[in-house]
């Protein structure tokens, strides 16, 4: 039986009231920093498919684990250099396993978003009451470990059920990132809930792992994205999300390209360096006043 998405309505970007970001900026930029936990007896993001059926899959598990042990510290250094606060997409299982990462984020006032329990467990196929319980546990755990109750949601693997947005709203949620279908925030058909742009294209897994592109390709894509969005935003603001995973972008040979990309964005005169939380807050206030 076919089913349409009823969470949001079709809205062409050419027929909306203009969005104005703070201080006359035209492009709201945030880094979606994926901070994830994977289990050794379950498959996960892989760089080599040939060993994914093994338990443990040392090759792929080790590649992913590099992000928490080494890669994230390179990424943090780059973000600090340009004064960028991460929008941390956090598995709730991370807190008790990598407390030093949580502490580093708290010291930098990161925005903390709920990103499921782990990236070994996709958030899909859950009955309503089971999902309600799961979301409550995820949100409560993240609040306990970070000191901040998450207001944004991005499912592991960008997964949701048809009820996720409404159930997340019950817990004080304000927005989701999963749908990736726009360059602007928009209101969902759930009272008080928004969709905020994220990206599966400007995403280091897609760029480096799926497509096999290079560091210079990554820099070119980031530059082209911000330049085009700046041009598009002459009459109404846009959002640019850069999706990063420490086990991908945090590899040593990619650090110079992350630095080059962030340098270009951070020094672009039309860019507001911000977080997904602040984008949602600003949009919600501005549209409530219309």
Image (cartoon, rainbow, N blue to C red):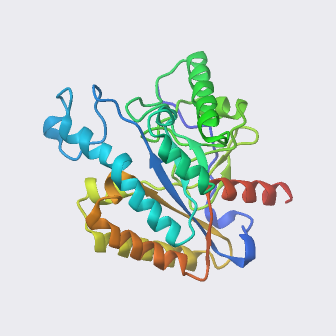
In this view, the residue in front, 201 or 232, is 201
Which residue corresponds to the image point at 26% horizontal and 38% vertical from the top-left? 61
Residue 12: x %, y % from top left: 61, 60
The answer to whether residue 34 is above or below residue 130 is below
Residue 85: x %, y % from top left: 58, 61
The answer to whether residue 56 is above or below residue 91 is above
The answer to whether residue 282 is above or below residue 263 is above
Residue 103: x %, y % from top left: 55, 47
In this view, the residue in front, 40 or 119, is 40
Which residue corresponds to the image point at 34% horizontal and 30% vertical from the top-left? 39
State which quadrant residue 14 falls in: bottom right
Q: Is residue 18 left or right of residue 244?
A: right
The answer to whether residue 287 is above or below residue 41 is below
Which residue corresponds to the image point at 56% horizontal and 23% vertical from the top-left? 134
Q: Is residue 59 left or right of residue 170?
A: left
Residue 150: x %, y % from top left: 64, 41
Residue 35 visible in the displayed image: yes
Q: Classify the position of the C terminus by image quarter.
A: bottom right
In this view, the residue in front, 169 or 31, is 31
Residue sitting at the far left? 50
Residue 201 visible in the displayed image: no
Which residue corresponds to the image point at 45% horizontal and 48% vertical from the top-left? 34
């Amino acid at each position: 039986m076919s089913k349409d998405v009823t969470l949001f309505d079709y809205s062409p970007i050419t027929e909306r009231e203009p969005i104005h970001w703070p201080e006359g900026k035209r492009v709201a930029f945030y880094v979606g920093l994926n901070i994830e936990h994977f289990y050794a007896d379950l498959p996960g993001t892989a760089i080599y498919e040939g060993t994914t059926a093994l338990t443990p899959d040392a090759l792929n598990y080790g590649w992913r684990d590099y992000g928490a042990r080494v890669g994230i510290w390179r990424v943090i250094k780059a973000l600090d250099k340009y004064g960028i606060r991460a929008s941390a997409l956090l598995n709730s299982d991370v807190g008790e396993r990598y407390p030093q990462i949580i502490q580093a984020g708290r010291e930098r006032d990161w925005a903390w978003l709920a990103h499921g329990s782990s990236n070994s467990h996709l958030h899909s196929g859950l009955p309503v009451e089971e999902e309600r319980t799961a979301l409550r546990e995820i949100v409560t755990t993240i609040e306990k470990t970070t000191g901040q109750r998450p207001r944004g949601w991005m499912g592991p693997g960008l997964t949701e059920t048809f009820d996720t947005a409404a159930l997340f709203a019950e817990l004080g949620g304000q927005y989701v990132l999963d749908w990736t279908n726009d360059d602007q925030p928009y209101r969902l058909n759930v009272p008080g809930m928004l969709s905020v742009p994220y990206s599966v294209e400007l995403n280091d897994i897609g760029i480096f792992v799926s497509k096999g592109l290079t560091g210079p390709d990554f820099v070119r894509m980031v530059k082209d994205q911000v330049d085009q969005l700046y041009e598009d935003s002459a009459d109404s603001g846009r959002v640019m999300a850069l999706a990063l995973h420490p086990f991908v972008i945090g590899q040593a040979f990619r650090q110079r390209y992350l630095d080059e990309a962030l340098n270009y964005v951070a020094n672009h005169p039309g860019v507001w360096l911000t977080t997904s939380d602040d984008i949602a807050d600003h949009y919600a206030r501005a549209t409530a006043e219309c």
